[in-house]
Image (cartoon, grey):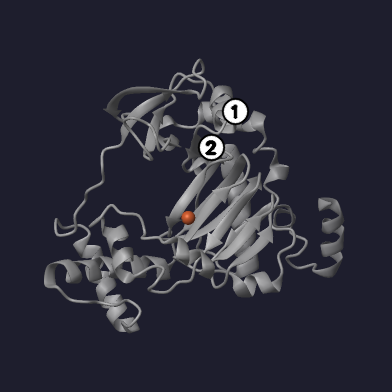
Amino acid sequence: MLNENTTHHHEDQPETGGDPSVLRMIPDWTDANTAAFQKEIMSFRHGLAETGLFTDEALIDLLERHPTEKLDVCTMSDPDHPVYPNKFRTGDFRDVSGKVLLEAVKAGCVWVNLREAMNVNPDYKIVLDEMYGSLSKKTGNLTFNPKGGILISSPVAKVPYHFDKTETILWHVRGKKRMYIYPLTQKFISDTAYENTITNYMSDDLPYDASFDAHAEAIDIPEGAALMWPLNSPHRVDNRTFCVSVTTEYSTRESAMKNAAMVTNATLRHHLGLKPSYEKDGNLTRKVKSVAGRVLRKTPIVPDNAETDLVTFRIDETSDNYMTDVEPFPRTF
Ligand SMILES: [Fe+2]
C-alpha cells in the first residue's frame, strides 16, 4: 500500500510529495490538512505502525530500557476499595519485566505512560524527527519543539475531561478508542478553570458535567490515524480495547503567550479581586500580561503546590489482578 502511494505521489507531486519521510509518516496529507492545521478538528493517516516500534515485542523491550523516572504505571481503583475508592493511584514496577507489565495492561488492571519516550530513546527519536520533519515540510512551520510520549492503556482505561496547555497531536497506533472534543467556550472551559490549572491555585480537574456530551464531537479513532484539535479544546477519551498511542505536544508563540498571561490573570483575580478575561483582552494587553506572567511565575505570589506522588501498590505477577497494595511511600524512582 505504501509502495503504491510512493509511485502515485511521485508522479503527481514531484516537489514534496515524493519526499520519502513524508510518504512514510503522513502519506495522505492534503492541502486541506495544511489549511486546517492547528485551527480545526482534523485527522490524517500516519505510518507509525510500519516502523515496527509499536509491536508487543518492541514495547516489551522499550519498557525494560526506558528511564524509570519517566515511566508511570497507574491504576484507577475500584469504587469499593476499602482505602482508595475511585482514586488515581501510582504503582511500583521496578522488579517487574516488560512482559509482565504489558500483560497487566492487557488484563485491564493498569496503564503505562512512557513520558518522552519518543525523545529519549534514539530509535524512537529518529521517528519523532521524521514525523515533525514531515509536518514542517507540509505546513511550512519550521519551529516545532515536540515532546512525544507513548501511552499503553487497557480496555477499561479512560482519560478524564481536561485540556492541554500546548498544541497536542494524538497519533493512534493500535486498538479502538473514542475521543470526545468539546467547544472552546466559557461554558466548557472558563478562564477561571484555565487559570487554576495553570497556576495550581486549585488541584481540581477541569469541571465536567455529563450534559456537556450533547455538545461534543465524538470520534472513533481508527488505527493508524492521527487526530488534532484547536489549542486548549477540552476533551476526554474512552478506550474500547487495549490501545497503544503516541501523544506529541509542542508549544507555539500563541500557547506560550496565553499561558503566561493566564498567570497574570489568576494573580489579578486572587489577589486584587478583579475579573479579567483573556478573550476580551486586546493583543497589546495580552502581551503585557504575558511578560508580567513570566515574572510572576518566579515569585512566591504564584503557589507551587505540586503534590508528593505517593506509591500505594506494586505490580505483582502472582496476584490475580497483578496488583498488591503497599504501605504508601513517596515516589523516589
Ligand atoms: Fe489531552
Where the C terminus falls, by quadrant? Answer: top left
Name the secondary structure under disc 2: loop
Residue lying at the far top of the rendered structure: 318
Identify the residue at horizontal 65%, vertical 66% (top origin). Answer: 138
x and y percentages locating residue 317 in the rendered image:
51, 18
Q: CA distance from mark 2 to mark 1?
A: 14 Å
Q: Earlier in the sequence, mark 2 or mark 1?
A: 1
Residue bearing mark 1: 60
* Amino acid type shown at disc 1: Ile
Is the residue 24 above or below the residue 314 in the image? below
Is the residue 144 above or below the residue 306 in the image? below
Q: Is residue 29 left or right of residue 205?
A: right
Identify the residue at horizontal 82%, vertical 63% (top origin). Answer: 9
Name the secondary structure under disc 1: helix
* Residue 72 appears anywhere in the view: no
Q: Which mark is residue 121?
A: 2
